[in-house]
Amino acid sequence: MSGREQCWVIHNEVVEPPPKIALTREQLTELHHQFIHDLEAKGLLVGAGPFLDDAGNRFGTGMIIFRAATRAEAETIANSEPYIAHGTRRLKLVPWQRIAGR
């Protein structure tokens, strides 16, 4: 890879107390996974996954790294992530430039 590729990191935080929504937690999780698979199918996904401690226990939320040329494009993509779109997580969008890796 030559040069830098503009990417973005969705590193979000849980909204407490959570808003009341029409979807179950399982439905929302399924939509979240579909969002990640859709990014991958479009060639935008760099990586995604939960945060785990050394014992394999989950803590916090996780992060999604994806490609987008501009902040406006990245915000549109990030705000369509189901947890964020339904208000159960607060978006923290961070620019990141990939200089190595696939």
Image (cartoon, rainbow, N blue to C red):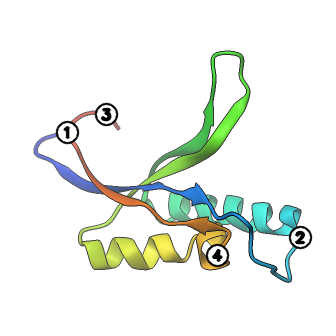
In this view, the residue in front, 51 or 46, is 51
Q: Residue at the front extreme?
A: 17
Closer to us: mark 4 or mark 2? Answer: 4
Quick one: label 3 or label 2, which is nearer the N terminus? 2
Closer to us: mark 1 or mark 2? Answer: 2
Quick one: label 1 or label 4, which is nearer the N terminus? 4
Give the residue at mark 1. Answer: 99
Amino acid type of the residue tagged 2 in the rendering: Thr
Quarter of the picture containing the C terminus is: top left
Closer to us: mark 4 or mark 3? Answer: 4
Residue 39, position in %: x, y? Answer: 52, 63
Q: Secondary structure at mark 3?
A: loop
Q: Determine contact: label 1, label 3, CB under 8 Å.
A: no
Give the residue at mark 4. Answer: 87
* 67 over 84 or under it: above or below: above
Quick one: label 4 or label 3, which is nearer the N terminus? 4
Q: Residue at the left extreme?
A: 3
Q: Which image quadrant for residue 18?
A: bottom right
Is residue 92 left or right of 48 when viewed as pictured?
A: left
Give the label on residue 101, or none.
3
Q: Secondary structure at mark 4?
A: loop
Closer to us: mark 3 or mark 2? Answer: 2
Marks 4 and 3, how far apart at CA: 33 Å
Amino acid type of the residue tagged 3 in the rendering: Gly
Residue pictured at 78% horizontal, 63% vertical? 30
Residue pictured at 59% horizontal, 71% vertical? 84
Marks 1 and 4, how far apart at CA: 33 Å
Residue 79, position in %: x, y? Answer: 50, 76
Give the residue at mark 2. Answer: 24
Residue pictured at 31% horizontal, 33% vertical? 101
Amino acid type of the residue tagged 4 in the rendering: Gly
